[in-house]
Image (spheres, rainbow, N blue to C red):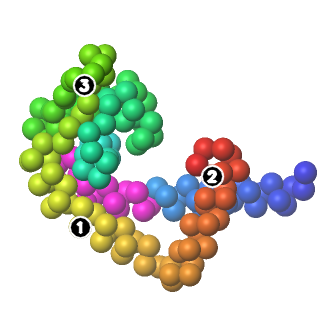
């Protein structure tokens, strides 16, 4: 193992982590201004774009521990943004379903959210974005977690 290559890998990890943290903090500001936390927004966005979801599967889709999902769903239900709906075919399964108020909130938030992400990625040219997408996908696939 070449020490220079190891140091380069460590530097890549640090740069990648810092870039993600900086971008994520900026994106989260838009979300928090609307009274949601990032996890609540992720659940709402999932339900809006993918429809009703079994509670047991939400965590895996938004990269959150399953124990935390109940808490997040409770909070969103209290805010009137989603509801729990039993599965008619299997009483063991409960779905999270976005409410009309939840749809309205996401429809108001999402354009601002996506525009902010676009602004933050504006430091890169279109071709550079595509290169970064391909390289990060390659990196994630090599770990088997993409």
Secondary structure under the numbered disc 3 in the rendered image = loop
Of labels 2 and 3, earlier in sequence is 3
Q: Which residue appears at 36% of the width and 67% of the height?
A: 117
Residue 54: x and y in percent read 32, 31
Secondary structure under the numbered disc 1 in the rendered image = helix
In whole angstroms, how far apart are the C-alphas of marks 3 and 1?
Answer: 32 Å
Q: Which residue appears at 55% of the width and 55% of the height?
A: 17
Horizontal side of 21 relative to 106 (left or right) equals: right
Of labels 3 and 1, earlier in sequence is 3
Residue 111 colored magenta? Answer: no
In whole angstroms, how far apart are the C-alphas of marks 2 and 1?
Answer: 28 Å
Residue 74: x and y in percent read 20, 28
Which residues are the magenta region? 22-36
Neighbor class of circle 1 (other Cα within 10 Å; few <14, some 14-19, many 20+) is few
Residue 25 colored magenta? Answer: yes
Q: What label does residue 111 carry, if any?
A: 1
Neighbor class of circle 3 (other Cα within 10 Å; few <14, some 14-19, many 20+) is few
Q: Which residue occupies the foreground of this view, 39 or 91?
A: 91
In whole angstroms, how far apart are the C-alphas of marks 2 and 3?
Answer: 35 Å
Neighbor class of circle 2 (other Cα within 10 Å; few <14, some 14-19, many 20+) is few
Helix, strand or loop for the magenta stretch, by majority: helix
Residue 126: x and y in percent read 50, 81
Q: Which residue appears at 15% of the width and 61% of the height?
A: 108
Q: What label does residue 87 carry, if any?
A: 3
What residue is shown with label 2? 140
Q: Could you say which quadrant of the image residue 25 lies in? A: bottom left
Q: Residue lying at the far right in this picture: please name it.
A: 1
């Amino acid at each position: 193992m070449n020490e220079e290559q190891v140091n380069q890998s460590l530097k890549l990890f640090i740069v990648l982590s810092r870039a993600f943290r900086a971008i994520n903090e900026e994106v989260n500001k838009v979300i928090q201004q609307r009274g949601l936390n990032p996890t609540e927004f992720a659940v709402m966005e999932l339900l809006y774009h993918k429809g009703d979801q079994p509670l047991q599967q939400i965590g895996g889709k938004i990269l959150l521990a399953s124990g935390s999902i109940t808490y997040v769903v409770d909070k969103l239900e209290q805010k009137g943004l989603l509801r729990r709906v039993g599965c008619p075919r299997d009483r063991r399964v409960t779905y999270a379903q976005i409410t009309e108020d939840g749809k309205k909130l996401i429809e108001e938030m999402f354009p601002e959210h996506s525009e902010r992400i676009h602004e933050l990625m504006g430091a890169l040219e279109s071709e550079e974005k595509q290169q970064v997408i391909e390289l990060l996908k390659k990196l994630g696939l090599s770990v088997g977690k993409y």
